[in-house]
Image (cartoon, grey):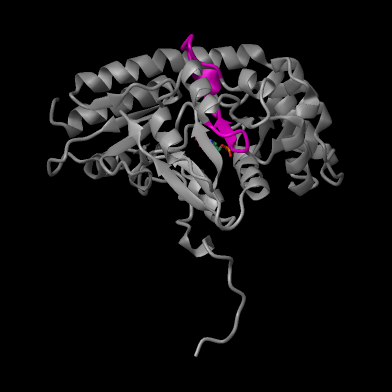
């Protein structure tokens, strides 16, 4: 007989724990990690200097409201700092939003190949994740709207989406918003917004500013190169900011993250360099991998989704083993319901060229 013991709430044990991208290639001297969409340029040197200087103050609690960081973000984007909340990564904010707005029996919608954290944060509250089909690996506004029921409380939309790299135009996001009941919260997760070069894209700032049921989440983990520090932020209506602030950890952002984040957001030249590097190599990778005969989903972010044939010896799993043996670590996407694809972050020139050469060899084209 099992002894009485604490039981997690319904839903928790249904969660498939998040498995991060691999970082090791056993027995290989030099590893190129292209599995977590980190920036190949690293953080701004100014952010590194600020981080090091923070070592002098490790005994002090940080400013729990991260006011100087919120002010710096506000200046960078022309936003009211009172409408910003910082989190320990945008993951933290996604958890906080789910905890504040979902309860047992509610539903939260995400798309078929949407970011894996959405079902995790949903199940953790006792609510049910509902999957809306995508079209061409892209969120489908009609399918999302058709999935809305009386129980729907949140729609999570990664725009651009990870791992597909596709995005919706601002018109489509507005159409989605217009079709949602006003009590449904639309979470626009714009972790990769800085990389998008499309004129018809808008990260969410405008929609948040003009509505009462939209929030936008951003991260310092991608273009700012501060993934290890865990720092993200959200912009939302005052009533949502108030709710999230009531349940967040009182010191959820470290002092080091605050000062490094300020330096990073103010180093516009570094961001521009990262963006330019990405634009150049995203196009190059898409073209070169395409020339090998592999399908690449057109991406607007800092990674590409590469599709492999079903043929024995040519599958994504085979390619992953082949690349890993050469120190080239991409991301398996089986958990994203894309078992025959690999996601590759845009890397340094050296890493990008090595992957294309290795794929050519893998496909027997050398
Ligand atoms: C779409 C999306 N949202 C959020 C995150 C989480 O980023 P953070 O490091 O800020 O928690 C990621 C990270 O991969 C992501 O791809």
Give the residue drawn at x 52%, y 86%.
2
Q: Position of residue 55 (x, y in %)?
A: 79, 38
- Relative to the observer, which residue lies in front, 298 or 361? 298
User: Is residue 300 one of those drawn in magenta?
Assistant: no
Q: Where is residue 14 in the image (x, y as percent from the top left)?
A: 46, 61
- Relative to the observer, which residue lies in front, 97 or 324? 97
State left or right for residue 308 relative to residue 266. left
Quarter of the image for residue 52 reads top right
Q: Where is residue 360 in the image (x, y as percent from the top left)?
A: 20, 27
Per the picture, the main secondary structure of the magenta-coloured stretch is loop
Q: In which quarter of the image is ligand 1?
A: top right
Can residue 257 be spotted in the picture? no
Range of residues picked out in magenta:
180-202
Q: Where is residue 12 in the image (x, y as percent from the top left)?
A: 53, 61
Give the residue drawn at x 55%, y 51%.
106
> Is 39 located above or below residue 228 in the figure?
above
Quarter of the image for residue 65 reads top right
- Relative to the observer, which residue lies in front, 82 or 92? 82
State left or right for residue 253 relative to residue 181. right
Query: Which quadrant would the C terminus be assigned to in this image?
Result: top left
Give the residue drawn at x 61%, y 16%.
270
State left or right for residue 330 relative to residue 72. left
Residue ranking furthest to the top: 199
Residue ranking furthest to the right: 60
């Amino acid at each position: 007989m099992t002894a009485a013991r604490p039981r997690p709430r319904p839903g928790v044990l249904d969660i498939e724990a998040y498995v991060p991208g691999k970082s090791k290639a056993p027995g290989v001297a030099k590893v190129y990690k292209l599995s977590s969409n980190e920036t190949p340029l690293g953080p701004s040197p100014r952010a590194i200097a600020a981080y090091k200087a923070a070592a002098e103050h490790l005994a002090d609690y940080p400013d729990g409201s991260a006011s100087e960081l919120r002010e710096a973000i506000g200046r960078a984007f022309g936003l009211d700092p009172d409408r910003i909340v910082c989190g320990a990564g945008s993951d933290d904010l996604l958890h906080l939003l789910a905890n504040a707005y979902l309860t047992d029996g509610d539903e939260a919608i995400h798309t078929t190949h949407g970011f894996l954290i959405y079902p995790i944060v949903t199940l953790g509250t006792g609510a049910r994740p509902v999957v809306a089909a995508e079209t061409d690996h892209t969120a489908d506004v009609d399918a999302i709207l058709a999935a809305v029921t009386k129980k729907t409380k949140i729609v999570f939309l990664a725009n651009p989406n990870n791992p597909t790299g596709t995005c919706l135009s601002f018109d489509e996001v507005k159409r989605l918003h217009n079709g949602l009941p006003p009590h449904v919260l639309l979470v626009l997760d714009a972790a990769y917004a800085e990389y998008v070069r499309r004129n018809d894209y808008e990260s969410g700032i405008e929609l948040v500013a003009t509505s009462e049921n939209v929030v936008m989440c951003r991260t310092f983990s991608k273009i700012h190169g501060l993934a290890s520090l865990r720092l993200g932020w959200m912009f939302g209506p005052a009533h949502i900011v108030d709710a999230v602030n009531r349940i967040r950890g009182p010191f959820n952002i470290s002092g080091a993250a605050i000062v490094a984040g300020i330096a990073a957001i103010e180093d516009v030249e570094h961001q521009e360099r990262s963006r330019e590097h990405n634009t150049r190599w995203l196009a190059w990778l898409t073209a070169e991998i395409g020339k090998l005969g592999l399908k690449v989903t057109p991406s607007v972010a800092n990674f590409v989704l590469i599709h492999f044939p079903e043929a024995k010896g040519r599958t994504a799993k085979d390619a992953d083993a082949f690349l890993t043996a050469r120190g080239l670590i991409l991301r398996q996407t089986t958990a994203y319901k894309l078992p025959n694809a690999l996601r590759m972050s845009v890397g340094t020139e050296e890493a990008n060229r090595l992957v294309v050469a290795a794929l050519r060899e893998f496909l027997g084209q050398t």
